[in-house]
Image (tube, rainbow, N blue to C red):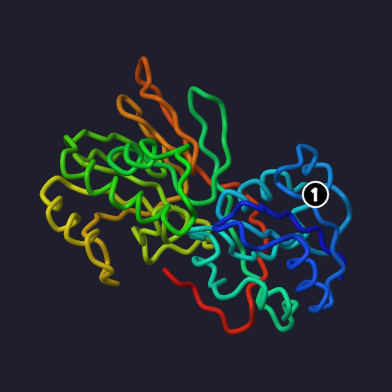
Amino acid sequence: MRAIVLHNPGAGNGDVAAEDLLAALAAGGIASRYCSTEQQDFPDTLAEPADLVVVAGGDGTVVKAVGELRARSVPLAILPLGGANNVARSLGVTGDPLEIARAGWRGSAARPLDIGTAAGPWGEQLFVEAVGLGALAEAAAAIAGRDVPGPEKSTRARAALLEVLAAARPQTVRLAIDGMEVEACCLLAEIMNTASVEPRLSLAPSADPGDGLLDLVYLEPGARAAMLAWLETSSRRPPPLTTRRGRLFALEWCQGRLHVGDAFHAPPESPGIVEVALLPEPVTVLAPAGSRPSC
């Protein structure tokens, strides 16, 4: 099998070297063409003929791969090296990435992965995890760009969210879901494709990243205390959020920061509409045999 390997050498601890990665793939019977996310010409490499694209990195690396993947018929295989790995875990891809590579995806299951688009005043962006505003967007933006080691990233992000959420002021969010108007007073709102979002928060545990639907989750002011308590524990109980599901969202963006994946947009100068939807054709991801989604 011919594979193109897109590797983020700084993902997580940055302790999976290119030579170790290629050796593990070779042991699994994969002939690899290597490219690093640090190479500016990596999109050209991804455009070359291949049977498989191996994405070795975190959630950001997955987004880079799907954004440059020109042939949707070519499947992806994720080797989770990041700190959160929300996309991989939503698809059931967990465990030692080098062991996954050595197994060579024998008997693997092909699973669809929906790709989202968010169109707003800035233009159009792809995303895989979520689009949102409110406390989570503000907390994530506050620590973005800081030089935080991979294992500490989620811990720092969770601590920042606890601080921001405790002081957050409610805002009215208006949007249309498949043409039906919805208005909610909330402290945070996330339109989710995956079950979890940075910092490894399972905000939409029933979300399926391959079902052609998006899950809106939002926190009403009366549930603030319950949400703070949920964040302070590692409980697998569902979070105290209200959920709605749909295919096409038109969000009225009036105030506050908004995030599309790990990209942030400053508060708008004037109200605008952000349209969030899924591309009509998903990509295919190979998951190891017997794997199950993990939130």
Picture coordinates of residue 132, whole percent (x, y): 38, 41
Query: What residue is shown at x 49% (from left), y 58% (from top)?
Result: 83
Give the tally of numbered discs. Answer: 1
Q: Position of residue 219 (x, y in %)?
A: 22, 49
Question: Residue 175: where, in percent of width, then height?
Answer: 33, 36
Q: Is 42 rendered above or below residue 197? A: above
Q: Is residue 252 left or right of residue 22?
A: left
The quadrant of the picture occupied by the N terminus is bottom right
Residue at position x 45%, y 39% in the image: 146
Element on which disc 1 rests: helix
Q: Residues within 10 Å of mark 1 (few under 14, many from 20)?
A: many
Q: Above or below — where is 8 with respect to 265?
A: below
Horizontally, residue 6 falls left or right of residue 57, namely: right
The residue indicated by pointer 1 is 46
Q: Is residue 109 left or right of residue 241?
A: right
**Where's residue 208, x and y in %?**
47, 64
Residue for point 36% across, 39% down: 137
Quadrant housing residue 16: bottom right
Image quadrant containing the C terminus: bottom left
Which of 111 and 280 lies nearest the eye of the viewer? 111
Query: Farthest top residue?
Result: 269
Residue 4: quarter of image = bottom right
Residue 98 vs residue 277, the one in the foreground: 98
Above/below status of 288 relative to 116: below
Q: Amino acid at mark 1?
A: Leu
